[in-house]
Amino acid sequence: MNKTQYITGLRSVEQLLTGDTAEVRQLYAEYQTANPRVQAIITTARQAGIEIQPANRARLTQISGEARHQGIVAEVRRSTVMDEASLRTMVEERLQSGDRLLLLLLDSVQDPHNLGACMRTADAAGVHAVVVPRHGAAGLGPTVSKVAAGAAEEIPFATVGNLGRVMTWLKDYGVRCIGTSDKADKSLFETDLSGPLALVMGREHTGLARGIASRCNALVSLPMHGSVSSLNVSVATGICLYEILRQTG
């Protein structure tokens, strides 16, 4: 499944030009830029036969919807965007081959900065796909790509109509769904996180929806010893993913 999008930011566009997970259709670059990184990107794009469109900063903002574009916008067709059928095929193939499987399911995370930060950590921790609901949640866009610092161009990203339905068939395949909740009795660090796994994280401020929490195989909490009662979702995601990585290598 391919989807045309606009990507901003030096690191993200550099990643696009060196990777193979997205087709860069054309590049919009600031007129007569003195930034050597933008100049290097333009040179690389020209060598690859990519069309370059000069534009002023206001036009770049209009194209991308992002004011902090750093003077560069890439129009891309991603190959990492998945629908539910593609996600299911990927899961089946990994399980049938005996490969490791780790998914990150985000239950209606709405802030694109949080989504971008989660994707950056997910890529670093070896997550095989990030899964979000199609409605009521942040999707891929310029802010997400910029915060993700290149990860959004690499890690598979699945948007699905019903996250609970995905959890149901994941469990049918033997993939455990581990959710986080500040009300859980068991700590993350006391939980066996081996085997095919889907980490399920809740939305900002309210956590997992009741229906999503009820579909989890287990709920775990993070020890909190200070005055705050919870962590930012991207910080909590990082802690959980790296505990999974610590246990599984």
Image (cartoon, rainbow, N blue to C red):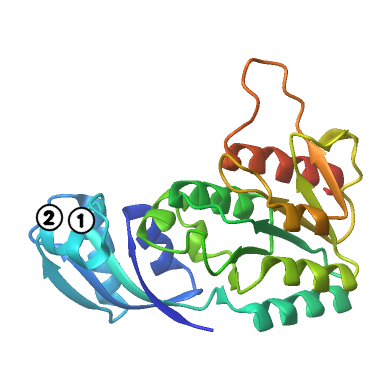
Seen as rendered, the residue at the extreme front is 210
Q: Are marks 2 and 1 in contact (CB under 8 Å)?
A: yes
Q: Give SS at disc 1.
A: loop
Q: Is residue 119 visible?
A: yes
Residue position for label 1: 71
Numbered tag placed on residue 33 in the rendering: 2
Q: Nearer the viewer, residue 220 or 238?
A: 220
Which quarter of the picture shows residue 46?
bottom left
The mark nearer the N terminus, 2 or 1, is 2
Type of amino acid under label 1: Gly
x then y, percent, for residue 182:
74, 34
Q: Nearer the viewer, mark 2 or mark 1?
A: 1
Neighbours of disc 1 within 10 Å: few (<14), some (14-19), many (20+): many
Does 36 sit left or right of 33 as displayed? right
Please, is residue 189 above or below residue 223 in the view? below
x then y, percent, for residue 148:
47, 52
Residue that appears at 18% across and 50% down: 35
Does 104 sit left or right of 29 as displayed? right
Residue that appears at 79% across and 64% down: 101
